[in-house]
Image (tube, grey):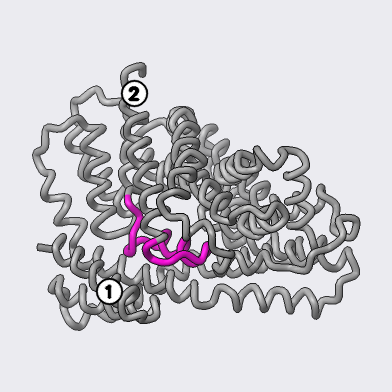
Amino acid sequence: MPLLIVALGVVLLLILIMKFNVNTFISLVVVSFLVALALGMPINEIVGSIESGMGGTLGGIALIFGLGAILGKLIADAGGAQRIAMTLIEKFGEKRIQWAVVTAGFVLGIALFFEVGLVLLIPIIYQISKQLRIQFLWLGLPMATALSVTHAFLPPHPGPTVIAQEFGANVGMVLVYGFIIAIPTTIIAGPLFAKFAKKMVPSAFEKQPTGSMASIGEAKQYKLEDTPGFGISAFTALFPVILMGVATIITLLQDALGISSNLFFDIVGMIGAPTTVMLISVLLAIYTMGIARKIPMTDLMKSAENAVAAIGMMLLILGAGGALKQVLIDGGVGDYVAQIFEGSTISPLILAWLIAALIRLAQGSATVAALTTAGLVMPLIAGSDVNLELLVLATGAGSIIASHVNDTGFWIVKESFGLTMKETFATWTVLETLISICGLVFVLALSLFV
């Protein structure tokens, strides 16, 4: 019954948005209330659940997106994004530019959260597509694939790291196996799938960039000699990666050497948090892209205001998507799925993937799906000789399948690239499913050798 309610809720949401053209934010809030009632949640807890879901989601990403948008806009308005784009085009050539973007997404994705990677790369990709007159989504979709794959399979991202801790797996080996799985998965679900998607949904590729994040990349075109140098532009854009990467390495060394926490490590932890990283990066950009180039502070702050204004509605939509996700969690949908698999005798790798996939489909959160799966699978693997590192990756693969309306990531991609609901399902939902299936296939193949 809970799964039927979820399905009806999704159908109602699609009807409101696609048939009656109701604003996405309003539709999500309305459906959240109706689904909560249908799941039998106590009346006096429904509003609290919706508010906590919205607050929890925005608390995690509003600062990251706001500061990330400002950073992207400062780099774009100063001509830094144009300089980076032109240099990449010059080095890789037009024919290989998609692979250059995928490589950049993969490298950045190792250190950056999915959301941070998007807000940093989209303005640069916008500039590349503009300079070469090629389709924005042709570059954007493979880039998003690379970010999603690294987020799902590679520590120090929260999902694989926390699951590894739950299973007692070796994080270092999860990283090694994760790379083996992530590289072919990125190639298949990125550039190769983009060719297929372009034929299936040409409308998504043909349109001009209209998304919230794409508008941040809109800036006056400069003569190349009037733009900041490539070195300082790239350093400013990559500074979040450098800062987060250094903090991660220090934390991993602390764990490996068994050093107890002290003030130094507490400070490193605070600086390495995405919000702090983005704030420091914005302050750096104000100097490198503005003050150092004699740009008035009023102009810099105008860029910041325009950036935040561009993503206002997107943030509300993301928050409302989080509200729907929280209602499904509090309504016990994940617990219901978990009960279905009690006492199962399927292979632990396939079972972990299947449970994570169903919980993900039902309630939307990849992290909740992964953690719930870890708790359920633990008793089932007692006494088995399953490789724990591969079990982590199988769980991670299952937890990102079929991103749809109850997943914040679905709305991030839809709003960032300016896609319709149909186009988002045909591109992003299919892409995430492909990543999930490829992940499972490569895990099973790897299990034959390790």
Quadrant in which residue 94 is drawn:
top right
Residue depicted at x 31% and y 54%: 368
Above-or-below relation of 177 to 46: above
Classify mark 1: residues with Cα within 10 Å, few (<14), some (14-19) or many (20+). Answer: some
Question: For the residue marked with disc 2, what is the amino acid?
Answer: Ala
For disc 1, the marked residue is 15
Range of magenta residues: 402-422
Any magenta on residue 48? no
Q: Residues within 10 Å of mark 2 (few under 14, many from 20)?
A: few
Residue at position x 19%, y 30% in the image: 347
Q: Residue furthest top?
A: 449
Q: Is residue 45 above or below residue 249?
A: below
Q: Does residue 355 appear to the left or right of 343 in the view shown? A: right
Q: Position of residue 228 (x, y in %)?
A: 85, 57
Residue shown at the point (31%, 40%) measured from the top left: 395
Q: Indicate whether 102 appears above or below 57.
A: above
Q: Is residue 362 visible?
A: yes
Q: Amino acid at mark 1?
A: Ile
Question: Which corner quadrant holds the C terminus?
Answer: top left
Instruction: Estimate the spatial distance between the alpha carbons at disc 2 and disc 1, rounded to whole Å.
Output: 41 Å
In this orientation, which residue lies closer to the viewer: 139 or 389? 139
Q: Position of residue 306 (x, y in %)?
A: 66, 77
Give residue 353's position: percent from left, percent from top: 27, 40
Asked whether 33 or 158 is in front, the reply is: 33
Magenta span includes 418:
yes
Q: In the rendering, which numbered label is found on residue 445? A: 2
Q: Residue at image x 70%, y 52%?
A: 132
Mark 2 vs 1, N-terminal side: 1
In the figure, 228 relative to 254: above or below?
below
Say which quadrant the N terminus sits in: bottom left
